[in-house]
Amino acid sequence: MSEKLTHNERMDSPSLSSAEQTALAGLAADLARVFGPRLHTLAVYGLHAPAASPRLVHTIALVDHLAFSDLTQCAPLVANWRRGSLAVPLILEREEFLRTLDVFPLEYGDIIAHHVIVAGTDLFAGVRVAPDDVRRACELAAKSHLVHLREGFLETGGHPQATASLIAASGAPFRALLANIARLGDDHDADVAAAAERQMGIPASVVREVLAHAGGNSSSIAEPSALLSRYIDAAERVWEFVDAWRARA
């Protein structure tokens, strides 16, 4: 590697606690022992997204070659990583990552856009996901989200608490979908609700109400069915917007 795999100033993110930084430094050292010079990049991703409490810190490692013997060496280390509030790292071959940008454009695009280098070189610098790949993925995600909400409501049997849980559980992917659509429109406002209103005419108040309960206490939703009705209307608008991309192309 062109840089020594040690804790460095790039990891001094205000989003990372000192305990998390210590755990990440330990992870970097562990991976360096397993992969040696084959390890090129270790980065944190997902810090910009709201997290559950306690949270797990997600990382990605890019290596030259990944063998089953490497996995067998990493497996005994997982328990210690988890004790440090680290999720199991996503370990990919460098070329594998680059060749599958079109397969996972939303997931990899988010990593490229929001990452913090822990150790090694920043191999994400200059890497871009093709806009057409992102558009196709957004279309799939938008339609899937709408179908999920409709079918999910039927599965609740109309019970308020189950409906509230559906809303809370679906908030995070809805936020991610809106953020990806906003980025395609070169709207980098951190307030995805405001961006959705500008781009698609969706009431920002509805988006904020849904996201306020994302992954949280669903029991605080006063009228779950009424909110879900507005939510589904918003999801339909999202789908109509992304479906019309083909006509605008």
Image (tube, rainbow, N blue to C red):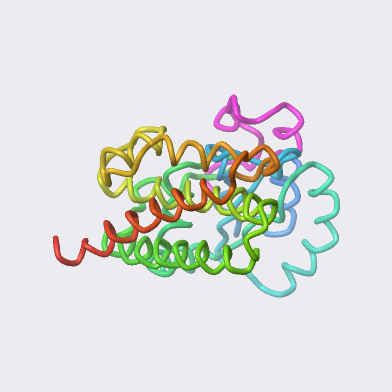
Q: Position of residue 237 (x, y in %)?
A: 32, 54
Q: Which is more toward the observer, 214 or 122?
A: 214
Q: Position of residue 191 (x, y in %)?
A: 41, 33
Residue drawn at the location 63% of the way across and 49% of the way down: 164
Residue farthest to the left, as pictured: 248
The picture quadrant where one finds residue 63 is bottom right
The C terminus - image quarter: bottom left
* Image position of 202 (left or right of 104): left
In this rendering, the answer to whether 129 lies above or below 126 is below
Residue drawn at the location 48% of the way across and 57% of the way down: 107
Is residue 21 a member of the stretch shown in magenta?
yes
Q: Position of residue 25 (x, y in %)?
A: 71, 38
Q: Which is more toward the observer, 195 or 84?
A: 195
Number of callouts in the render? Answer: 0
In this rendering, the answer to whether 33 lies above or below 85 is below
Is residue 235 a member of the stretch shown in magenta?
no
Magenta span: 1-25
Residue drawn at the location 71% of the way across and 75% of the way down: 68
In this rendering, the answer to whether 72 lies above or below 21 is below
* Image position of 234 (left or right of 87): left
